Amino acid sequence: MGVPEQPRFSRRDFLRLLGKGAKLAVASSIMFNLRGSETTGGSKEAPMYMRTDAAEFRAKRRVVPFVSDYLPDELEYTLDQRLSFYTKLKELGVAGVRTEFRLGKLMRDDGSFDLNIEKSYRESLKAMKEAGLSLSALVLFSPAEWMVDLAQHDETAFLLVYQSFIEKAQMICDQAGLQPTFVQVMNEVNNSFFKNFEQSTIVKMIDVTHQAYSLRTDKPKIMTTIITNTAFADRSKWRKDVETLVKRAGDALEAVGFDYYFAYDHPLEPLMPQSVFDLYKDKKEVFEWLLEQKSTGFLRDKEVLIAEMGMPVFQKSDFPVYNDWFAQIGYDLYYRAIDHVMLQWERQGGKAEDFISHVGLFCGGDHAAVQTYAPGKIDFLPWTLLHFNKETKDWDLTDAAKRLPYLNSTRLNPQGS
């Protein structure tokens, strides 16, 4: 696959985004920070990402990019519209989709299943397959209140309910002819905004899931995810939480995904001249911690994914400068940080995909079914990849999406495999 031409983004474009009275220092700092990583040189004093061997390492990478999406929960779309949606995602250079089968939506409180939801899940998987996408991860999440209550009062009975849900999920995937690479048990298990189960229950759910899939010839890997933002969980605490969880779950937990939205930790700093450097340094530090744990720590025998990263924003009418800035260049900051840490791993003799195997983007579309638990108001359009055009009845690419073919093909998976 050839490398798409990098979109040109001039100083004038930045000034237009920043509006009247913007300081040149802001635009200059952003331009310097982003474009510095595109230059290569042979100087021994040059940063590692500017050395001539960086391009050689990048060309060999086989890191799989995927997109989280909730189109299966939108019942009003036709099969053709679903196929168009997934086809356009494929054109962004992503290999698969991470989607959720919602416990409290697919299963009713009497233990029966909603046939309309089941059909939508099945048709969406078929559309993914026809578009040439894999099912990167199947997320088993969003329990109903009665499920949480049952787990608290009769954990054994709840695990039997959960077992039947897994069997239904397996049947839907079998009927669609698309099997997941990973099955994710719950989501962001340390996120205080979610009504998650106790960690002891989650450990048992991981074990039940592992056993349910263990005899399949197309067995997926069992995983869960951790949110790494200080806005949701204290940094020292989430690191201790994930280490405890990994040790308690043992071999049943084969992979761990990490979610990171740097704007939640620094909501207004992008408007300040020095802030781009601060954002980048902080975000890179999270990935460097992963590098340490994957090299010699408790993650060395686990597969590591960046399960979610994206540009969460405030309501567009409130902060138009902030939103437009992130929509157009936010992914560059993520990919640059991942690239730099991968180069450290590669220069130690490792393959990038043995450090971080998959990188996930959140999210595919601005769907009404997506529930956010973030503080403040959210406007989905700037941080999603495809927007449904009600006039054309088709999907339009957002500014964030337009950057991805270049970033995916030069920083993660140049061969598109």
Image (tube, rainbow, N blue to C red):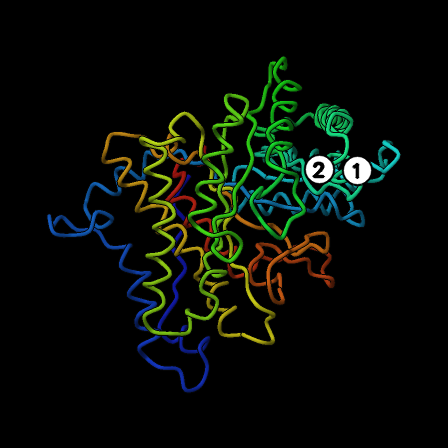
Q: Image quadrant of residue 184?
A: top right
Secondary structure of the residue carrying tag 2 is strand
Q: Quadrant of the N terminus?
A: top left
Q: Name the amino acid type tagged 2.
A: Phe
In the rendered view, does 97 fall on the left or right side of 103? left
Residue at 61% of width from left, 43% of height from top? 87
Secondary structure of the residue carrying tag 1 is helix
Closer-to-camera residue (124/237): 237
Residue 248 on image: x %, y %: 52, 27
Q: Quadrant of the C terminus?
A: top left
Residue at 41% of width from left, 59% of height from top? 7
In the rendered view, does 43 fall on the left or right side of 125? left
When the figure is inspected, residue 66 is found, relative to residue 168, above or below; the finding is below
Disc 2 vs disc 1: Cβ atoms closer than 8 Å?
Answer: yes
Q: Image quadrant of residue 356?
A: top left
Residue 245 on image: x %, y %: 51, 33
Residue 263 on image: x %, y %: 47, 61
In the rendered view, does 363 fall on the left or right side of 267? right
Which residue, given by chain and number where applicable, does mark 1 sit on? 106
Work out which residue is located at the far bottom of the displayed protein and give it.
21
Work out which residue is located at the far left of the displayed protein and give it.
44
Residue at 32% of width from left, 79% of height from top? 24
In the rendered view, does 331 fall on the left or right side of 223? left
Mark 2 crowd level (few <14, some 14–19, many ≥20, 10 Å Cα): many
Which residue, given by chain and number where applicable, does mark 2 sit on? 101
Labels 2 and 1: the sequence-earlier one = 2
Q: Name the amino acid type tagged 1.
A: Leu
Closer-to-camera residue (193/80): 193
